[in-house]
Image (tube, grey):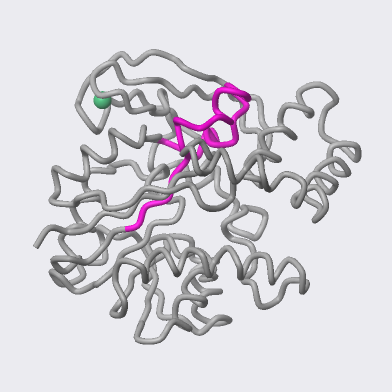
Amino acid sequence: MVELEHPACEICGATAPDPVAARTDLLFGGDTVYTICRCGGCGVLYQHPRPTEATIGQLYPHDTSYPSYRRDVAVEPLLRRLDRRYGLAKRCRLVTRHVQAGHLLDVGCATGDFLSEMRRQPGWSVMGIEPSPTAGRYAHDQVGLTVVAGTLNDAAFADASFDAVTMWDVLEHVYKPREVIAEAARILRPGGVLVVNHPNTASLDRRIFTRLWVGYELPRHLYLYPPELLRQIMAEYGLREVERVCFYGSHAAAVDSLIYLVEQRIGRGWASRILRKILRSLPVRVAAVPYFTLTDRLGLGSNVTAVFARKP
Ligand SMILES: [Zn+2]
């Protein structure tokens, strides 16, 4: 049984936030309605009430039905594999643009697909940390990665022991973002970078799809950060924003939101599955490139990635 709690904002301590969007779990079903609110104190969006930390695990299936826990790229069909490798290579380039070589930690590495691409980069050694035992074991046993089981704040890495720390779709899931950011800052060497990808509250998709925007991902997303607010929070921990970019996942996110919209009308079934296949097909994706290139360039993509350098 999932228990709900009514926390204060972890960013600023304010209480009594204003509801922004409410919906059921659109990924796995159920009747419980979850609500995302806006903090009147700092402007962060957070789930309120929210599942307790002790019970939220029930809302994550520990198999490959959760998108982040899907199998690694090596076992997928060729076209999808090339497509994902392309996206992963872009992520690697974002890191190596700021730090050319060193030791990298991927927080929430899931089945290790980013790390398996990153370790191919010359001069890099990599490791991951992952709370899901199934995903972490897969990354270790099948992909051959060094993976610590658990969460960043339990791992107790040495001060300044990494040149880069990455968090792909992680910070929106954590209960105590300030503790996680402080810990990332502590384990980074001066000049090292923290790369954070998260749902873009300034995105066009959020305005278009409102409560059905995939970025809300209720009830698993706990905090959503307006990009400017995240920049301010990071600065409090000596992390200076050096780049912010929308550079991948925009098409896939828009399709997911659109499918949620269609399923509200016609329900979930073969029709929505076929539509999803069509919308994700190569011709549609190619046709949509100009639109998503433009919206990404304008910083309006559904996901945004920011790079923060630890001050010397
Ligand atoms: Zn707040």
Can residue 23 be seen?
Answer: no
With respect to residue 101, does 293 lie above or below?
A: above
| Residue drawn 46% across the image and 73% down it | 115
Q: Return the x and y of residue 170 as percentages of the image width and height.
A: 42, 51
With respect to residue 275, does 94 lie above or below?
A: below
Segment colored magenta: 195-222
Query: In which image quadrant can residue 271 be found?
Result: top right
Q: Return the x and y of residue 82 as percentages of the image width and height.
A: 69, 71
- Is-magenta flag for residue 4? no
Can residue 39 be seen?
Answer: yes
With respect to residue 207, does 137 lie above or below?
A: below
| Residue drawn 72% across the image and 32% down it | 258
Left of 29 or right of it: where is 103? left
Q: Return the x and y of residue 51 as percentages of the image width and height.
A: 44, 33
Q: Which of the two residues, 88 or 128, is positioned nearer the viewer here?
A: 88
Left of 47 or right of it: where is 229? left
In the image, farthest residue toward the left: 312
